[in-house]
Image (spheres, rainbow, N blue to C red):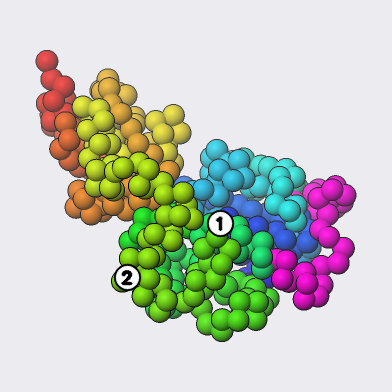
Amino acid sequence: MSSGAALVVEIASDAELKAFCSNRGGLCAVLLWAPWHPPSVHLTKVLEAIAADQKGVGFAKVNTDICPSLATSVGADQVPFVAFLDPLGNNVDKLAGADPPKLVERVKALAARPLPVASAPAQAVAGESDLNTRLKQLIDFSPVMLFMKGSKEEPFCKFSKQAIALLNETKAEYSTFDILKDDEVREGLKTYSNWKTYPQLYIDGELIGGVDIIKEMNEDGTLKEALGNATGGEEEESGKSLEERMKALINKEPVMCFIKGTPEEPRCGFSGKLVEIMKQNSVSYGHFNILSDEDIRQGLKAYSNWPTYPQVYAKGKLIGGIDIIKELVDEGALLDELGMSA
Protein backbone atom coordinates (compact mmCIF):
# COMPACT_ATOMS: atom_id res chain seq x y z
CA MET A 1 0.00 0.00 0.00
CA SER A 2 1.50 3.29 -1.04
CA SER A 3 0.02 5.79 1.34
CA GLY A 4 2.97 8.12 0.89
CA ALA A 5 3.92 9.91 4.08
CA ALA A 6 0.47 9.42 5.56
CA LEU A 7 0.56 7.65 8.89
CA VAL A 8 -3.20 7.06 8.84
CA VAL A 9 -4.72 5.95 5.54
CA GLU A 10 -8.16 7.21 4.48
CA ILE A 11 -10.42 4.28 3.52
CA ALA A 12 -13.51 4.87 1.38
CA SER A 13 -14.77 1.41 0.38
CA ASP A 14 -14.97 -2.19 1.59
CA ALA A 15 -12.56 -3.27 -1.14
CA GLU A 16 -9.99 -0.71 0.00
CA LEU A 17 -10.30 -1.91 3.59
CA LYS A 18 -9.78 -5.52 2.56
CA ALA A 19 -6.71 -4.61 0.51
CA PHE A 20 -5.33 -2.45 3.31
CA CYS A 21 -5.52 -5.28 5.86
CA SER A 22 -4.06 -7.78 3.39
CA ASN A 23 -1.13 -5.52 2.49
CA ARG A 24 -0.20 -4.76 6.09
CA GLY A 25 0.15 -8.43 6.94
CA GLY A 26 -0.37 -7.68 10.63
CA LEU A 27 -2.59 -5.85 13.09
CA CYS A 28 -4.69 -2.99 11.68
CA ALA A 29 -6.52 -0.34 13.70
CA VAL A 30 -9.40 1.31 11.84
CA LEU A 31 -11.11 4.38 13.29
CA LEU A 32 -14.69 5.14 12.27
CA TRP A 33 -15.40 8.83 12.79
CA ALA A 34 -17.76 11.58 11.69
CA PRO A 35 -17.04 15.27 11.03
CA TRP A 36 -20.12 16.36 13.03
CA HIS A 37 -18.90 14.57 16.18
CA PRO A 38 -16.09 16.61 17.85
CA PRO A 39 -14.75 13.77 20.08
CA SER A 40 -14.30 11.53 17.06
CA VAL A 41 -12.62 14.35 15.11
CA HIS A 42 -10.19 14.74 18.02
CA LEU A 43 -9.53 11.00 17.98
CA THR A 44 -8.31 11.20 14.36
CA LYS A 45 -5.49 13.44 15.64
CA VAL A 46 -4.80 11.06 18.52
CA LEU A 47 -4.56 8.21 16.00
CA GLU A 48 -1.93 10.14 14.02
CA ALA A 49 0.19 10.43 17.16
CA ILE A 50 -0.21 6.75 18.01
CA ALA A 51 0.65 5.76 14.43
CA ALA A 52 3.92 7.70 14.64
CA ASP A 53 4.89 5.61 17.66
CA GLN A 54 3.54 2.18 16.60
CA LYS A 55 5.20 1.56 13.23
CA GLY A 56 4.31 -2.13 13.21
CA VAL A 57 0.57 -1.50 13.20
CA GLY A 58 -1.46 -0.34 10.21
CA PHE A 59 -3.71 2.63 10.91
CA ALA A 60 -6.70 3.78 8.85
CA LYS A 61 -9.76 5.96 9.28
CA VAL A 62 -13.24 5.90 7.76
CA ASN A 63 -15.58 8.88 7.51
CA THR A 64 -18.92 7.20 8.20
CA ASP A 65 -20.83 10.03 6.52
CA ILE A 66 -19.09 9.12 3.26
CA CYS A 67 -19.05 5.33 3.65
CA PRO A 68 -21.69 4.20 6.17
CA SER A 69 -21.56 0.60 4.87
CA LEU A 70 -18.11 0.16 6.41
CA ALA A 71 -19.56 0.79 9.87
CA THR A 72 -21.83 -2.21 9.33
CA SER A 73 -18.94 -4.28 7.98
CA VAL A 74 -16.88 -3.92 11.17
CA GLY A 75 -19.81 -3.98 13.59
CA ALA A 76 -19.66 -0.31 14.61
CA ASP A 77 -22.82 1.02 16.22
CA GLN A 78 -21.51 4.47 17.15
CA VAL A 79 -18.73 6.97 16.51
CA PRO A 80 -15.98 7.04 17.39
CA PHE A 81 -15.33 3.32 17.08
CA VAL A 82 -12.01 1.57 16.57
CA ALA A 83 -11.98 -1.89 14.99
CA PHE A 84 -8.82 -3.97 15.32
CA LEU A 85 -8.51 -6.31 12.35
CA ASP A 86 -6.21 -9.12 11.25
CA PRO A 87 -4.80 -9.46 7.68
CA LEU A 88 -7.97 -11.22 6.54
CA GLY A 89 -10.13 -8.38 7.80
CA ASN A 90 -11.47 -10.37 10.76
CA ASN A 91 -12.25 -8.56 14.00
CA VAL A 92 -9.60 -9.10 16.66
CA ASP A 93 -10.88 -6.53 19.14
CA LYS A 94 -12.85 -3.29 19.29
CA LEU A 95 -13.05 -0.07 21.28
CA ALA A 96 -16.18 2.08 21.32
CA GLY A 97 -16.21 5.68 22.47
CA ALA A 98 -13.68 8.50 22.73
CA ASP A 99 -11.09 7.37 25.26
CA PRO A 100 -7.56 8.28 24.04
CA PRO A 101 -5.65 6.74 27.00
CA LYS A 102 -7.51 3.46 26.63
CA LEU A 103 -6.90 3.51 22.86
CA VAL A 104 -3.14 3.91 23.41
CA GLU A 105 -3.13 1.03 25.89
CA ARG A 106 -5.22 -1.21 23.62
CA VAL A 107 -2.98 -0.63 20.59
CA LYS A 108 0.18 -1.38 22.58
CA ALA A 109 -1.31 -4.53 24.09
CA LEU A 110 -2.59 -5.90 20.80
CA ALA A 111 0.61 -4.99 18.93
CA ALA A 112 2.60 -7.11 21.39
CA ARG A 113 0.25 -10.07 21.03
CA PRO A 114 0.80 -12.56 18.19
CA LEU A 115 -2.13 -12.97 15.85
CA PRO A 116 -3.96 -16.31 15.87
CA VAL A 117 -2.37 -18.80 13.49
CA ALA A 118 -5.61 -19.11 11.53
CA SER A 119 -5.57 -15.37 10.91
CA ALA A 120 -1.92 -15.06 9.92
CA PRO A 121 -1.25 -14.06 6.32
CA ALA A 122 -0.08 -16.65 3.84
CA GLN A 123 3.64 -17.30 4.07
CA ALA A 124 4.38 -16.92 0.38
CA VAL A 125 3.13 -13.40 -0.14
CA ALA A 126 5.70 -12.43 -2.76
CA GLY A 127 5.77 -13.01 -6.48
CA GLU A 128 3.62 -12.51 -9.52
CA SER A 129 1.19 -15.33 -8.73
CA ASP A 130 0.37 -13.81 -5.35
CA LEU A 131 -0.22 -10.39 -6.92
CA ASN A 132 -2.51 -11.94 -9.50
CA THR A 133 -4.43 -13.65 -6.71
CA ARG A 134 -4.87 -10.30 -4.95
CA LEU A 135 -6.00 -8.63 -8.15
CA LYS A 136 -8.56 -11.35 -8.86
CA GLN A 137 -9.89 -11.10 -5.31
CA LEU A 138 -10.30 -7.34 -5.70
CA ILE A 139 -11.98 -7.68 -9.10
CA ASP A 140 -14.37 -10.30 -7.71
CA PHE A 141 -15.04 -8.32 -4.53
CA SER A 142 -18.25 -6.93 -6.01
CA PRO A 143 -20.30 -7.81 -9.13
CA VAL A 144 -19.47 -4.31 -10.39
CA MET A 145 -16.00 -2.97 -9.56
CA LEU A 146 -14.49 0.32 -10.72
CA PHE A 147 -10.76 0.83 -10.29
CA MET A 148 -10.28 4.59 -10.30
CA LYS A 149 -8.28 7.53 -9.03
CA GLY A 150 -9.94 8.70 -5.83
CA SER A 151 -13.31 7.67 -4.45
CA LYS A 152 -16.98 7.98 -5.45
CA GLU A 153 -17.26 11.14 -3.41
CA GLU A 154 -13.90 12.64 -4.46
CA PRO A 155 -12.67 11.49 -7.89
CA PHE A 156 -9.10 12.66 -8.49
CA CYS A 157 -9.15 12.85 -12.30
CA LYS A 158 -11.70 13.94 -14.89
CA PHE A 159 -11.96 10.45 -16.41
CA SER A 160 -12.76 8.85 -13.05
CA LYS A 161 -15.26 11.63 -12.41
CA GLN A 162 -16.96 10.93 -15.76
CA ALA A 163 -17.12 7.19 -15.03
CA ILE A 164 -18.70 7.81 -11.62
CA ALA A 165 -21.30 10.13 -13.14
CA LEU A 166 -22.24 7.56 -15.80
CA LEU A 167 -22.55 4.73 -13.27
CA ASN A 168 -24.58 6.89 -10.89
CA GLU A 169 -27.04 7.66 -13.68
CA THR A 170 -27.89 3.96 -13.92
CA LYS A 171 -28.69 3.76 -10.15
CA ALA A 172 -26.79 0.45 -10.04
CA GLU A 173 -24.88 -0.74 -7.00
CA TYR A 174 -21.11 -0.80 -7.46
CA SER A 175 -17.87 -0.72 -5.48
CA THR A 176 -14.69 1.22 -6.11
CA PHE A 177 -10.98 0.87 -5.42
CA ASP A 178 -8.63 3.87 -5.26
CA ILE A 179 -5.53 2.82 -7.20
CA LEU A 180 -3.66 5.88 -5.91
CA LYS A 181 -3.45 4.16 -2.52
CA ASP A 182 -1.72 1.02 -3.79
CA ASP A 183 1.07 1.20 -6.38
CA GLU A 184 1.28 -2.59 -6.57
CA VAL A 185 -2.35 -2.84 -7.62
CA ARG A 186 -2.08 0.25 -9.80
CA GLU A 187 0.81 -1.13 -11.87
CA GLY A 188 -0.09 -4.81 -11.63
CA LEU A 189 -3.65 -4.38 -12.90
CA LYS A 190 -2.37 -2.78 -16.11
CA THR A 191 -0.56 -6.01 -16.98
CA TYR A 192 -3.22 -8.33 -15.57
CA SER A 193 -5.98 -6.73 -17.65
CA ASN A 194 -3.78 -5.64 -20.57
CA TRP A 195 -5.36 -2.21 -20.18
CA LYS A 196 -2.88 0.57 -19.51
CA THR A 197 -5.11 3.41 -18.27
CA TYR A 198 -7.62 4.18 -15.54
CA PRO A 199 -10.45 4.00 -14.69
CA GLN A 200 -11.15 0.33 -15.41
CA LEU A 201 -14.64 -1.14 -15.05
CA TYR A 202 -15.24 -4.84 -14.33
CA ILE A 203 -18.63 -6.54 -14.39
CA ASP A 204 -18.93 -10.09 -13.04
CA GLY A 205 -15.14 -10.38 -13.06
CA GLU A 206 -14.77 -9.40 -16.72
CA LEU A 207 -13.01 -6.24 -17.91
CA ILE A 208 -15.43 -3.91 -19.69
CA GLY A 209 -12.92 -1.13 -20.36
CA GLY A 210 -12.30 2.52 -19.60
CA VAL A 211 -14.42 5.63 -19.67
CA ASP A 212 -14.73 5.71 -23.49
CA ILE A 213 -16.21 2.20 -23.50
CA ILE A 214 -18.52 3.11 -20.61
CA LYS A 215 -19.72 6.14 -22.58
CA GLU A 216 -20.40 4.05 -25.71
CA MET A 217 -22.33 1.44 -23.72
CA ASN A 218 -24.32 4.16 -22.00
CA GLU A 219 -25.25 5.71 -25.34
CA ASP A 220 -26.39 2.43 -26.93
CA GLY A 221 -28.24 1.26 -23.79
CA THR A 222 -26.09 -1.78 -23.08
CA LEU A 223 -24.48 -0.37 -19.92
CA LYS A 224 -27.65 -0.41 -17.83
CA GLU A 225 -28.49 -3.87 -19.15
CA ALA A 226 -25.05 -5.24 -18.21
CA LEU A 227 -25.19 -3.64 -14.76
CA GLY A 228 -28.73 -4.90 -14.19
CA ASN A 229 -27.71 -8.46 -15.02
CA ALA A 230 -24.71 -8.24 -12.68
CA THR A 231 -26.62 -6.84 -9.70
CA GLY A 232 -29.71 -8.98 -10.13
CA GLY A 233 -31.83 -6.20 -11.59
CA GLU A 234 -32.89 -4.92 -8.17
CA GLU A 235 -34.16 -1.64 -9.55
CA GLU A 236 -36.37 -3.36 -12.13
CA GLU A 237 -37.53 -5.89 -9.57
CA SER A 238 -38.72 -3.13 -7.28
CA GLY A 239 -40.66 -1.67 -10.20
CA LYS A 240 -40.11 1.85 -8.90
CA SER A 241 -38.03 4.76 -10.10
CA LEU A 242 -36.09 6.86 -7.63
CA GLU A 243 -38.72 9.62 -7.80
CA GLU A 244 -41.49 7.11 -7.07
CA ARG A 245 -39.52 5.74 -4.12
CA MET A 246 -39.02 9.24 -2.69
CA LYS A 247 -42.71 10.10 -3.08
CA ALA A 248 -43.68 6.87 -1.35
CA LEU A 249 -41.31 7.56 1.56
CA ILE A 250 -42.40 11.18 1.95
CA ASN A 251 -46.04 10.05 2.18
CA LYS A 252 -45.38 6.97 4.28
CA GLU A 253 -46.58 8.71 7.47
CA PRO A 254 -48.46 12.02 8.06
CA VAL A 255 -45.18 13.40 9.44
CA MET A 256 -41.92 12.05 8.01
CA CYS A 257 -38.42 12.96 9.20
CA PHE A 258 -35.40 12.19 7.02
CA ILE A 259 -32.47 12.05 9.42
CA LYS A 260 -28.97 10.68 9.84
CA GLY A 261 -29.32 7.56 11.94
CA THR A 262 -32.44 6.60 13.88
CA PRO A 263 -34.45 8.27 16.67
CA GLU A 264 -32.76 5.86 19.10
CA GLU A 265 -29.26 6.54 17.72
CA PRO A 266 -29.03 9.84 15.81
CA ARG A 267 -25.81 10.10 13.79
CA CYS A 268 -25.47 13.89 13.76
CA GLY A 269 -26.14 16.75 16.16
CA PHE A 270 -28.91 18.29 14.05
CA SER A 271 -30.77 14.99 13.73
CA GLY A 272 -30.41 14.48 17.47
CA LYS A 273 -31.86 17.93 18.15
CA LEU A 274 -34.82 17.23 15.85
CA VAL A 275 -35.57 13.96 17.63
CA GLU A 276 -35.45 15.81 20.95
CA ILE A 277 -37.88 18.50 19.74
CA MET A 278 -40.32 15.93 18.38
CA LYS A 279 -40.25 14.06 21.69
CA GLN A 280 -40.74 17.23 23.75
CA ASN A 281 -43.77 18.17 21.64
CA SER A 282 -45.23 14.63 21.60
CA VAL A 283 -45.12 14.48 17.81
CA SER A 284 -45.76 11.06 16.30
CA TYR A 285 -43.70 10.66 13.16
CA GLY A 286 -42.13 8.21 10.76
CA HIS A 287 -38.43 8.34 9.97
CA PHE A 288 -35.93 7.32 7.32
CA ASN A 289 -32.17 6.96 7.84
CA ILE A 290 -30.65 8.68 4.81
CA LEU A 291 -27.24 7.13 5.61
CA SER A 292 -28.71 3.76 4.65
CA ASP A 293 -29.48 4.73 1.04
CA GLU A 294 -27.17 6.98 -0.96
CA ASP A 295 -29.68 7.32 -3.83
CA ILE A 296 -32.35 8.68 -1.50
CA ARG A 297 -29.82 10.85 0.35
CA GLN A 298 -28.67 12.61 -2.82
CA GLY A 299 -31.94 12.44 -4.76
CA LEU A 300 -34.05 14.02 -2.06
CA LYS A 301 -31.83 17.11 -2.02
CA ALA A 302 -32.72 17.81 -5.64
CA TYR A 303 -36.33 16.64 -5.33
CA SER A 304 -37.05 18.97 -2.41
CA ASN A 305 -34.57 21.69 -3.43
CA TRP A 306 -33.26 21.50 0.14
CA PRO A 307 -29.53 20.64 0.32
CA THR A 308 -29.16 19.61 3.97
CA TYR A 309 -30.52 17.15 6.54
CA PRO A 310 -32.63 16.62 8.51
CA GLN A 311 -35.72 17.29 6.42
CA VAL A 312 -39.27 17.24 7.83
CA TYR A 313 -42.39 16.61 5.73
CA ALA A 314 -46.06 16.87 6.74
CA LYS A 315 -48.71 15.23 4.54
CA GLY A 316 -46.20 15.08 1.68
CA LYS A 317 -45.21 18.73 1.94
CA LEU A 318 -41.70 19.88 2.89
CA ILE A 319 -41.69 21.88 6.12
CA GLY A 320 -37.94 22.43 6.27
CA GLY A 321 -34.86 21.61 8.33
CA ILE A 322 -33.89 22.00 11.95
CA ASP A 323 -33.78 25.83 11.86
CA ILE A 324 -37.34 26.03 10.53
CA ILE A 325 -38.52 23.53 13.13
CA LYS A 326 -36.88 25.57 15.91
CA GLU A 327 -38.57 28.76 14.66
CA LEU A 328 -41.95 27.02 14.60
CA VAL A 329 -41.41 25.85 18.18
CA ASP A 330 -40.47 29.37 19.30
CA GLU A 331 -43.62 30.74 17.61
CA GLY A 332 -45.81 28.01 19.08
CA ALA A 333 -46.80 26.99 15.56
CA LEU A 334 -45.14 23.59 15.21
CA LEU A 335 -48.22 21.41 15.71
CA ASP A 336 -50.29 23.65 13.44
CA GLU A 337 -47.70 23.43 10.66
CA LEU A 338 -47.52 19.64 11.04
CA GLY A 339 -51.32 19.41 10.86
CA MET A 340 -51.54 18.02 14.38
CA SER A 341 -53.35 20.79 16.23
CA ALA A 342 -56.61 19.95 17.96
Q: Position of residue 98 (x, y in %)?
A: 59, 44
Q: Which residue is at a point 81% across and 75% down the rendered structure image?
A: 127
Q: Is residue 60 visible?
A: no
Give, as a three-letter code, the residue at label 1: Ser
Q: Which residue is at a point 52% across and 82% down the rendered structure image?
A: 197
- Which one is in front in this view, the residue at disc 2 or the one at disc 1? 2
Q: In the rendered structure, does residue 128 fall within the stretch colored magenta?
A: yes
Viewer-side residue, 309 vs 157: 157
Viewer-side residue, 134 vs 61: 134
Residue bearing the label numbered 2 = 220
| Horizontal relation, residue 135 to residue 152: left or right | right
Q: Which residue is at a point 20% across and 48% down the rendered structure image?
A: 304
Q: Position of residue 339 (x, y in %)?
A: 13, 25
Q: Position of residue 230 (x, y in %)?
A: 49, 55
- Going from the N terminus, do you reach mark 2 or mark 1 first? 1
Q: Is residue 117 visible?
A: yes
Q: Which residues are magenta?
A: 107-134
Q: Count residues near mark 2 (Cα–Cα under 10 Å), then give few for <14, some for 14-19, many for 20+.
A: few
Q: Secondary structure at mark 2?
A: helix
Q: Secondary structure at mark 1?
A: loop
Q: Count residues near mark 1 (Cα–Cα under 10 Å), then give few for <14, some for 14-19, many for 20+.
A: many
Q: Position of residue 274 (x, y in %)?
A: 31, 35
Give, as a three-letter code, the residue at label 2: Asp
State the quadrant of the N terminus: bottom right
Q: Which residue is at a point 65% across and 57% down the rendered structure image?
A: 18
Of the numbered discs in the image, which one, if any, rests on residue 142? 1
Of the numbered discs in the image, which one, if any, rests on residue 275? none
The quadrant in which residue 93 appears is top right
| Horizontal relation, residue 115 to residue 295: left or right | right
Q: How far is disc 2 from disc 1 in space, using C-alphas?
A: 24 Å
